[in-house]
Image (cartoon, rainbow, N blue to C red):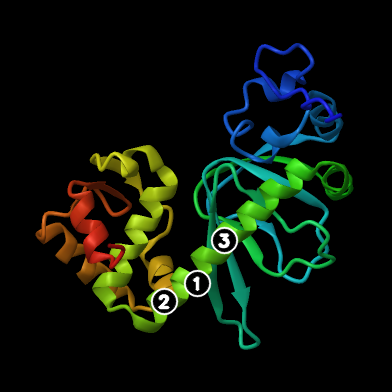
Amino acid sequence: MQNPEPKRLDVHNSDVPVVCRSCEARHKGICGALTPKQLLALSKGTTKHHITADQEISAEGGAPTAFSNIISGVVKLSKLMADGRQQIVALQFAPDLVGRPFDVQNKTTVEAATDVRLCSFPVRVLEDLIAESPDLEHRLHQQNLRELDEARDLLLSLGRKSASERVASFIYFIARHIDPESVAEHSTLKFQIPLKRSDIADFLGLTLETVSRQMTKLRQAGVITIIDRRSIEITNLAKLEHMAGAS
């Protein structure tokens, strides 16, 4: 006889901890895989806090003390070289989990790329829940696979794509994470780019001047409207996708 389905979370379920009921990231993040009882166990050590842009969240080489769900905002992961140079290697968005369970040492430095709201909980509590919840383990596995795919796409961009394709790919990548519904519908969408242009250059292996020049070319091609130095509107998503080499 099959075991009954575990009781899933509902905003109207009185078993759901009060601190979790209004959380925007709860259903799409790892918490959506938990039963009310498991969520209660996780919430006992939960703290919610606001991190301002450019503030460090955790340092490379340190021992992890907590994991965090991103409720809103974008974080950047970077690696430090022996001579002090730093390379941005990944970005994370809501409702991603920041941190790698069962690792004894942080592999990257994590910083807030924008103002970020986090929901943090002790390492041990989450690792114990992973051991007892196949659904939670599955969601974490899905996030890891998605991040692996994104790392491979970045390698492709750095190894094979032209400067114009790299910048177009970056903007398309941000759009897919910030507003996936508009991307799926090929609608116009407006958003703030989470990285400064110098960080975009770092991420894409380009110079600052090249990034600025390619942004201007996208504007002249009618693909984007530059509202200010960080905010843009994508006016032709299909053309952007084509210029990114995504289709």
Residue at image position (17%, 54%) is: 223
Answer with mark 2 or mark 3, whichever residue precedes in sequence.
3
Please tell me whether mark 3 sits on a helix, a strand or a loop.
helix
- At which x and y percent is residue 80? 63, 77
- Residue type at mark 1? Arg
Left/right of residue 18 with respect to residue 40 in the rendered view: left
**Residue ID at (85%, 25%):** 37
Find residue 102 and report its horizontal and vertical position in percent. Answer: 83, 60
Query: Where 167 falls versus 13 (above or below)?
Result: below
Q: Are marks 1 and 2 in contact (CB under 8 Å)?
A: yes
Estimate the spatial distance between the alpha carbons at disc 2 and disc 3, rounded to whole Å.
Answer: 14 Å
Mark 3 — residue? 147
> Residue at the bottom extreme?
83
> Is there CB contact under 8 Å for labels 1 and 3?
no
Classify 229 as above or below 118. below
Position of 163 relative to 130 (above/below): below
Task: Name the image quarter holding residue 154.
Answer: bottom left
Residue receiving disc 2: 156
| Type of amino acid at the residue the image marks with label 2 | Leu
Disc marking residue 187:
none
Spot occupied by residue 84 in the image (x, y as percentages of width and height): 61, 82
Packing grade of label 2 (10 A; few <14, some 14-19, many >=20) is: few
Please, what secondary structure does the residue beneath circle 2 have? helix
Residue under label 1? 152
| Disc 1 from disc 2: Cα separation | 6 Å
Q: Left or right: 93 with respect to 157?
A: right
